[in-house]
Image: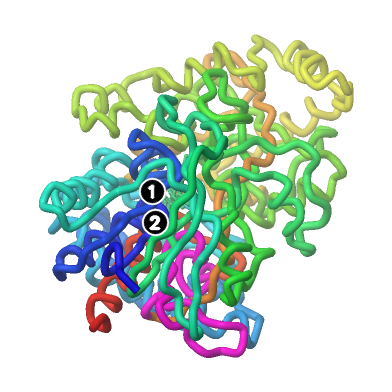
């Protein structure tokens, strides 16, 4: 059977680009099949903040953070909480290998390709409240200078160079509908050619089929992303331990994150595991300037906002902003309402609100030191102010009574009682005014401010929300926001897909989000953040290198 290339890669997101880069480095020819147009090269990674989980890095050391492989692995395993003897067999091995990569070669590999990192380090997922529960014991969220577009660039440029050299052919608007298998081995793909689309990046494109295709190769790598763009699929696989699925969710990923390849892989004989593990956020806000359907943006919160449920009850410890994503989501859904509230003031908004997404951080994305400097000046970053002005989820008022009225007006539910909210805010403020106390959020804020990065750019000076001079008051309605898929195609450490009987699938590989970022679920139940782009890099690299090694 004539081959169209040595290897077919399905999906030109980050994982597909990394696998293609590694294959071409080894002199292998690649046919890259992508359902969207050329403007979408890089997939979700383009939109990402470019946050990367690194362990014991020079950036951490310079800031006085003492980290180690052992500590990071312990944090990872405590967060992952692997508990499935079979479905977690490969994920456990991937976790160890990935943390090793993050503590070792990850930084130098990316730097070698031209990536640079910001000198400050973020502290995401601060945890479940004890040393042995979920969360990062120390700050590990590194910012790539240039955010998502930069991590795409360092691979895409090399892939496009290989295309010009004739080693790569890219077929845009080609959607794979079937994996071809003969004698137990994958040998190609079949699908439909979608009508041309001139839509700009991220905009949902037409699904009208105008032709058919079939391509053959010695190996196929599936790098098609997760399921977060299809709410129906998200609801169908909703984790039972999270309770009911929300009725109303925002969408944190473009529509191409459609999850179709999981069923297509399963039909071809692949093992799909941990389908019910996902990583959706609690702090979603409606994008006032949407690109894709239902477009929501995630607030990356500092720790000081007061978090109230829909009825005005304060969320219990440790469900503070930026601590325990999944625990908080479960708690919120348990209230019987899909949404919750951040209550804060202008000075917290200015210092602590960041928005996830490359387009929401033009200073970092454009690699502009001048724009970056404006972060340390007074006032909120431009994109945050724009949300405050135009966002439908924001209520801004000069006093608490008007704020609570505005919140009730926004939802039309009148669930908030002014007196009860006032008492909770006053109690919180009293704790903030003391150097010590029993309020765990106040203690966490004080701890955070001992870390220089947090003190400088991330955590506001503790103060009362009702103190004068920090206003106006701000309330933000938060909704669940779909994002990452933590389960998927089960793979061994070579990113080779497994069959349900535990044997390796000849010729079939998978990497990135469709493979649960490695193994079918390297994160287990919880992520430490900044681990997804790196998971695409690591699993895409493993796939490319293993195939290049094993092909005849
Ligand atoms: C706003 C945002 C911010 C983020 N921030 C961070 C961050 O700071 N740090 C971090 O670690 N992660 C972050 N992430 C997550 C990370 O970007 C993604 O998990 C990662 O980029 C997924 O890459 P992928 O290659 O696996 O899949 P994708 O990027 O989804 O690419 C898959 C590609 O496959 C194509 N495809 C799918 N099915 C088919 C088919 N049947 N035929 C042909 N083509 C197909 C799709 O069109 C797409 O181009 C963020 C994500 C978003 C959206």
Residue 137 appears in the figure: no
Disc 2 is placed on an element classified as: loop
The quarter of the picture where the N terminus appears is: bottom left
Q: In this view, does 96 lie to the left or right of 310?
A: left
Above or below, comparing residue 523 to residue 73 in the picture: above
**Relative depth, front residue between 36 and 147:** 36
Mark 1 surroundings: few (<14), some (14-19) or many (≥20) residues within 10 A: many
Residue 186 visible within the image: yes
Q: Distance between the residues labelled 2 and 1?
A: 6 Å
Residue 496 belongs to magenta span: yes
Over which residues does the magenta segment extend? Answer: 494-523
Report x, y in % for residue 353: 49, 31
Instruction: State the residue at coordinates (43%, 36%).
Output: 357
Q: Nearer the viewer, residue 182 or 170?
A: 182
Image coordinates of residue 356 in percent, x first then y, are 46, 37
Q: Position of residue 349 (x, y in %)?
A: 51, 26
- Which of the labelled discs sits on residue 523, or is there none? none
Secondary structure state at the residue bearing disc 1? strand
**Residue 458 is one of the magenta-drawn residues:** no
Q: Name the residue under label 2.
A: 139
Q: Residue at x 43, y 21 (%)?
A: 383
Nearer the observer, 193 or 290: 193
- Decide which of 315, 548 is in the foreground and name it: 548
Q: Does the residue labelled 2 lie within 8 Å of ligand 1?
A: no
Q: Name the residue under label 1.
A: 122
């Amino acid at each position: 059977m004539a081959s169209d290339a040595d290897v077919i890669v399905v999906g030109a997101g980050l994982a597909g680009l990394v696998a293609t880069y590694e294959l071409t480095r080894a002199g292998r020819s690649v046919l890259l099949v992508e359902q969207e147009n050329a403007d979408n090269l890089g997939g979700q990674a383009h939109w990402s903040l470019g946050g990367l989980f690194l362990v014991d890095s020079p950036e951490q050391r310079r800031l006085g953070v003492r980290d180690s492989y052992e500590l990071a692995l312990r944090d990872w395993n405590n967060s992952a909480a692997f508990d499935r003897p079979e479905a977690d067999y490969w994920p456990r091995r991937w976790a160890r290998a990935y943390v090793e990569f993050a503590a070792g070669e990850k930084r130098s590999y990316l730097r070698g390709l031209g990536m640079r990192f910001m000198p400050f380090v973020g502290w995401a997922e601060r945890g479940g409240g004890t040393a042995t529960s979920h969360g990062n014991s120390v700050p590990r969220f590194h910012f790539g200078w240039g955010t998502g577009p930069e991590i795409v660039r360092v691979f895409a440029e090399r892939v496009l160079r290989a295309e010009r050299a004739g080693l790569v052919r890219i077929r845009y608007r080609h959607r794979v509908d079937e994996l071809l298998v003969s004698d137990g081995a994958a040998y190609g793909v079949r699908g439909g050619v979608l009508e041309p689309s001139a839509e700009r990046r991220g905009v949902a494109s037409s699904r009208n089929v105008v032709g058919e295709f079939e391509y053959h190769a010695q190996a196929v790598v599936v790098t098609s992303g997760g399921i977060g763009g299809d709410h129906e699929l998200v609801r169908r696989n909703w984790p039972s331990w999270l309770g009911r699925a929300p009725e109303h969710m925002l969408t944190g990923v473009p529509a191409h994150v459609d999850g179709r390849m999981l069923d297509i892989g399963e039909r071809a004989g692949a093992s799909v595991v941990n389908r019910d593990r996902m990583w959706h956020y609690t702090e979603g806000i409606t994008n006032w300037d949407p690109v894709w359907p239902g477009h929501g943006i995630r607030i990356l919160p500092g720790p000081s906002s007061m978090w109230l449920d829909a009825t005005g009850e304060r969320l219990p410890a440790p469900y503070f902003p930026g601590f325990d994503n999944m625990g908080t989501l479960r708690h919120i859904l348990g209230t019987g309402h899909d949404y919750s509230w951040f209550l804060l003031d202008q000075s917290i908004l200015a210092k602590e609100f960041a928005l996830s997404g490359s387009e929401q951080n033009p200073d970092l994305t454009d690699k502009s030191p001048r724009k970056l400097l404006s972060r340390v000046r007074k006032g909120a970053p431009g994109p945050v102010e724009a949300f405050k002005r135009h966002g439908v989820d924001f209520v801004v008022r000069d006093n608490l009574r008007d704020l609570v009225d505005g919140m009730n007006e926004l939802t039309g539910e009148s669930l908030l009682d002014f007196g009860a909210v006032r008492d909770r805010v006053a109690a919180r403020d009293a704790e903030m005014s003391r150097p010590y106390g029993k309020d765990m959020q106040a203690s966490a804020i004080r701890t955070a401010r001992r870390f220089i990065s947090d003190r400088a750019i991330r955590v506001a000076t503790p103060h009362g929300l009702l103190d004068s001079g920090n206003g106006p008051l701000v309330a933000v309605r938060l909704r669940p926001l779909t994002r990452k898929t933590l389960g998927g195609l089960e793979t061994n450490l070579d990113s080779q897909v497994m069959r349900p009987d535990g044997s390796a699938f000849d010729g079939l590989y998978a990497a990135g989000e469709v493979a649960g970022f490695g193994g079918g679920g390297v994160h287990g139940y919880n992520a430490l953040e900044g681990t997804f782009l790196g998971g695409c890099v690591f699993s895409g690299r493993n796939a490319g290198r293993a195939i290049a090694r094993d092909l005849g």
